Amino acid sequence: MRRLTRTAVSTALRTATEHGVTTSASVVSQRNHNTDATTKKRVADDANSIEIRFIDRDGETHVVRGFVGENLLETAHRNDIELEGACEGSLACSTCHVVFKDEKVFDSLDEACDDENDMLDLAYGLTSTSRLGCQVTCEKGALDGCEVVLPAATRNFAVDGYKPKPH
Ligand code: FES
């Protein structure tokens, strides 16, 4: 079988492309181009996001932007804030427990549902302005610029061995 030089191969590919022939090389190139376009990072701006100030366990404040429509757990994870979220937002843990510093901001939130309140009852360091981060959605208004404190510890009963009692 005749072997083609590298130059001959690239000339053949260029000629094929010029004549509208799809080659595996051009498919790969097009796929890479499409992947680049679809994986472009969404940029947070004033129109599509709000400011959230996470205060970590060391008291350090991290000012980040939360996209309108995502929850605080997602915002935290996207910005490398250490908020656990063991059950990934399925209301089966309390490791995404957060505390709102401002009572007015807390009062502006939609009320927690019964399942959230049940999980909050298990949260370490529960306060009167506690919520589960995965249940609070970023939206324009009072939440913009809010301060959210991460409790000193979390209680993950799945790991810590806690067994909920039947009601
Ligand atoms: Fe488990 Fe929020 S991540 S309840």
Image (cartoon, grey):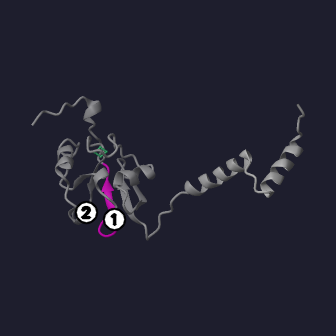
Question: Which amino acid is tagged 1?
Answer: Glu
User: How far apart in space, not on screen, are marks 1 and 2 (Cα)?
Assistant: 16 Å
Q: Quadrant of residue 33?
A: bottom right
Answer above or below: position of 76 versus 167: below
On-image quarter of the N terminus: top right
The count of marks equals 2
What residue would you read off at disc 1? 139
Q: Position of residue 17 (x, y in %)?
A: 78, 54
The chief SS type of the magenta part is loop
Is residue 5 highlighted in magenta? no
Q: Residue at x 47, y 63 (%)?
A: 44
Residue 12 has which mark? Answer: none
62 or 113: nearer the viewer: 113
Q: Residue at x 64, y 50 (%)?
A: 31
Q: Is the residue marked by circle 2 packed among few (<14), some (14-19), or many (20+) residues within 10 Å?
A: some
Q: Is residue 79 left or right of residue 100?
A: right
Is residue 141 highlighted in magenta? yes
On-image quarter of the C terminus: top left
Q: Residue at x 38, y 63 (%)?
A: 68
Q: Which residues are magenta?
A: 139-150
Question: Which amino acid is tagged 2?
Answer: Asp
Q: Residue furthest top?
A: 161
Q: Residue at x 32, y 49 (%)?
A: 150
62 or 98: nearer the viewer: 98
Residue 102 has which mark? Answer: 2
141 or 21: nearer the viewer: 21
Q: Is residue 156 left or right of residue 9?
A: left
Q: Position of residue 136 (x, y in %)?
A: 29, 56
Q: Quadrant of ligand 1?
A: top left
Q: Position of residue 80 (x, y in %)?
A: 45, 49
Answer above or below: position of 4 versus 78: above
